[in-house]
Image (spheres, rainbow, N blue to C red):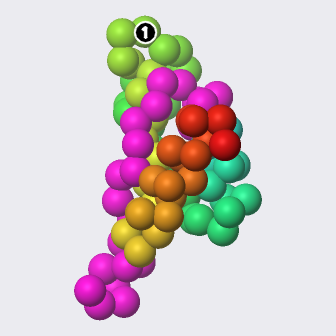
Amino acid sequence: MNDRAEDEFIELAKVQGDFEAQVLKGLLESEGVDVIVKAGLVQAIHPITVDGLGEMRLCVREGDLDRAREILEAFREGG
Protein backbone atom coordinates (compact mmCIF):
# COMPACT_ATOMS: atom_id res chain seq x y z
CA MET A 1 0.00 0.00 0.00
CA ASN A 2 1.42 3.39 -0.90
CA ASP A 3 1.27 6.56 1.20
CA ARG A 4 -1.46 8.04 -0.96
CA ALA A 5 -3.82 5.09 -0.34
CA GLU A 6 -3.31 5.38 3.42
CA ASP A 7 -4.35 9.04 3.26
CA GLU A 8 -7.66 8.30 1.52
CA PHE A 9 -10.75 8.37 3.71
CA ILE A 10 -12.99 5.31 3.59
CA GLU A 11 -16.21 4.41 5.36
CA LEU A 12 -15.84 2.94 8.83
CA ALA A 13 -19.46 2.83 9.98
CA LYS A 14 -22.98 4.08 9.42
CA VAL A 15 -24.85 5.51 12.39
CA GLN A 16 -28.25 7.09 12.98
CA GLY A 17 -28.19 10.81 13.62
CA ASP A 18 -25.69 13.52 14.31
CA PHE A 19 -25.53 12.92 18.07
CA GLU A 20 -24.22 9.35 17.74
CA ALA A 21 -21.89 10.44 14.92
CA GLN A 22 -20.36 13.22 17.02
CA VAL A 23 -19.91 10.97 20.08
CA LEU A 24 -18.07 8.35 18.04
CA LYS A 25 -16.08 11.01 16.20
CA GLY A 26 -14.93 12.43 19.54
CA LEU A 27 -13.99 8.97 20.79
CA LEU A 28 -11.92 8.19 17.70
CA GLU A 29 -10.25 11.60 17.62
CA SER A 30 -9.30 11.24 21.30
CA GLU A 31 -7.38 8.13 20.20
CA GLY A 32 -5.59 10.04 17.43
CA VAL A 33 -7.76 8.87 14.53
CA ASP A 34 -8.84 11.54 12.00
CA VAL A 35 -12.56 11.32 11.21
CA ILE A 36 -14.85 12.87 8.62
CA VAL A 37 -18.61 12.69 9.16
CA LYS A 38 -20.67 12.59 5.98
CA ALA A 39 -24.42 13.07 5.86
CA GLY A 40 -26.90 12.54 3.09
CA LEU A 41 -28.66 15.47 1.49
CA VAL A 42 -31.83 14.95 3.55
CA GLN A 43 -29.88 15.13 6.82
CA ALA A 44 -28.14 18.30 5.70
CA ILE A 45 -31.47 20.00 4.99
CA HIS A 46 -33.68 18.48 7.73
CA PRO A 47 -31.72 17.21 10.75
CA ILE A 48 -34.11 14.37 11.59
CA THR A 49 -33.84 10.62 11.92
CA VAL A 50 -36.73 8.71 10.34
CA ASP A 51 -36.44 5.33 8.61
CA GLY A 52 -32.76 5.72 7.82
CA LEU A 53 -33.06 9.29 6.55
CA GLY A 54 -30.77 10.50 9.34
CA GLU A 55 -27.98 8.12 8.43
CA MET A 56 -24.49 9.49 8.93
CA ARG A 57 -21.25 7.89 7.71
CA LEU A 58 -18.03 7.95 9.69
CA CYS A 59 -14.97 7.89 7.45
CA VAL A 60 -11.35 7.39 8.52
CA ARG A 61 -8.03 7.21 6.74
CA GLU A 62 -7.50 3.80 5.19
CA GLY A 63 -4.33 3.34 7.25
CA ASP A 64 -6.35 3.83 10.47
CA LEU A 65 -9.25 1.55 9.54
CA ASP A 66 -8.26 -1.54 11.55
CA ARG A 67 -7.39 0.50 14.63
CA ALA A 68 -10.63 2.49 14.37
CA ARG A 69 -12.64 -0.75 14.15
CA GLU A 70 -10.94 -2.03 17.30
CA ILE A 71 -11.69 1.22 19.15
CA LEU A 72 -15.38 1.13 18.17
CA GLU A 73 -15.68 -2.57 19.04
CA ALA A 74 -14.16 -2.01 22.49
CA PHE A 75 -16.48 0.99 23.04
CA ARG A 76 -19.59 -0.95 22.05
CA GLU A 77 -18.59 -3.85 24.32
CA GLY A 78 -18.22 -1.42 27.20
CA GLY A 79 -14.48 -1.74 27.51
Question: x and y percent of residue 56 in the render?
Answer: 45, 34
Q: Amino acid at mark 1?
A: Val
To which residue does mark 1 refer?
50
Along the line of sight, the residue nearer the viewer: 2 or 76: 76
Question: x and y percent of residue 20 in the render?
Answer: 60, 30
Question: x and y percent of residue 30 in the render?
Answer: 73, 59
Q: Is residue 28 toward the left or the right of residue 9 in the image?
A: right
Q: Is residue 2 toward the left or the right of residue 60 in the image?
A: left
Q: Is residue 6 toward the left or the right of residue 44 in the image?
A: left
Instruction: Describe the element under mark 1 as helix, strand or loop.
Output: loop
- The answer to if 61 sits in the magenta stretch is no
- The answer to if 11 sits in the magenta stretch is yes
Residue depicted at x 31% and y 80%: 5
Residue depicted at x 34% and y 85%: 4
In the image, the segment drawn in magenta is 1-22
Residue depicted at x 62% and y 55%: 28
Residue occupying the far right of the picture: 30
Q: Quadrant of the N terminus?
A: bottom left
**Does the rendering let one see residue 75?**
yes
Question: x and y percent of residue 14 in the render?
Answer: 40, 36
